[in-house]
Amino acid sequence: MPNINWDDVTESSGGGASILPSGAYKCIITSAEFVKTKKGAAALLVLWDVADGEHKGHFSDSFFDNKPFRHKDYLMLEGKALGVTKHKLHVLADANPSFKPTVAIGQDQAQPFVGKTCYLLLQERKYTYNGRDQSEVNVVRWLSPEEFRAGDFKVPDTIDERVASPSPAPVAAPTAPAIELADEDLPF
């Protein structure tokens, strides 16, 4: 049996990674790369993590290793979403005054986005996958620093798409004759 110094052990109740609730967060871009979406559209894929507060570094937990889909957003570089991308680049420039995101994109440089601050409004989504309840967060909107500081946004309600598990069918009690007892047979 190993000799364990229990004073050096941090108590834990177990469980997986904590859930990031819906809300606005100051975030930092941790990775950026130019990609093609499944539909073949050009995009800048950014991974982000929470930069401040009680959830700081939320996605740096080892649980999220090899799960970049949990904390990503696309800046579409063609198609109907260019207006949304323009907004994201505008508020990104506002949050990082010396950074010119349109120049970086024009020069096909994704690396300058890494380390930049962004303010994201997130919505938690609960769903069922392979019979197990799961949770994820989706980026609803990129906020300007002013909107974030002033609280000029509405926190979206959590989306709950979980599938209720069917209750097991009731089991009929076995049919057996009732035992006949007289009052005098009872011990009280």
Image (cartoon, rainbow, N blue to C red):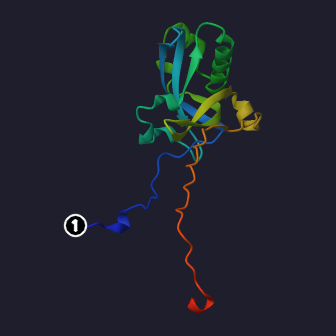
- Residue 83: percent from left, percent from top: 69, 12
Tag 1: amino acid:
Met
Q: Which residue is depicted at the point 46% across and 39% down?
A: 60
Vertical placement of residue 139 versus 45, above or below: below
Query: Residue at the location (45% across, 37% down)?
Result: 64
Residue furthest to the left in view is 1
Classify residue 134 by image quadrant: top right
Question: What kind of element bears circle 1?
Answer: loop
Q: Would you place residue 41 above or below residue 120 in this image?
A: above
Quarter occupied by the N terminus: bottom left
Q: Which residue is drawn at 29% across and 66% down?
A: 4
Q: Determine which residue is flagged by label 1.
A: 1
Identify which residue, 54 or 35, lies in the foreground: 35
From the viewer's perspective, is 72 left or right of 66? Answer: right
Camera-nearest residue between 76 and 90: 76
**Above or below — where is 176 with respect to 68?**
below
Position in image of residue 62 (x %, y %): 41, 41
Q: Where is residue 15 in the image (x, y as percent from the top left)?
A: 47, 51
Circle 1 residues within 10 Å: few <14, some 14–19, many ≥20: few
Along the line of sight, the residue nearer the viewer: 95 or 56: 56
Q: In which quarter of the image is the C terminus?
A: bottom right
Using the image as rendered, state which of residue 112 and residue 11 is in the foreground.
11
x 53%, y 34%: residue: 49
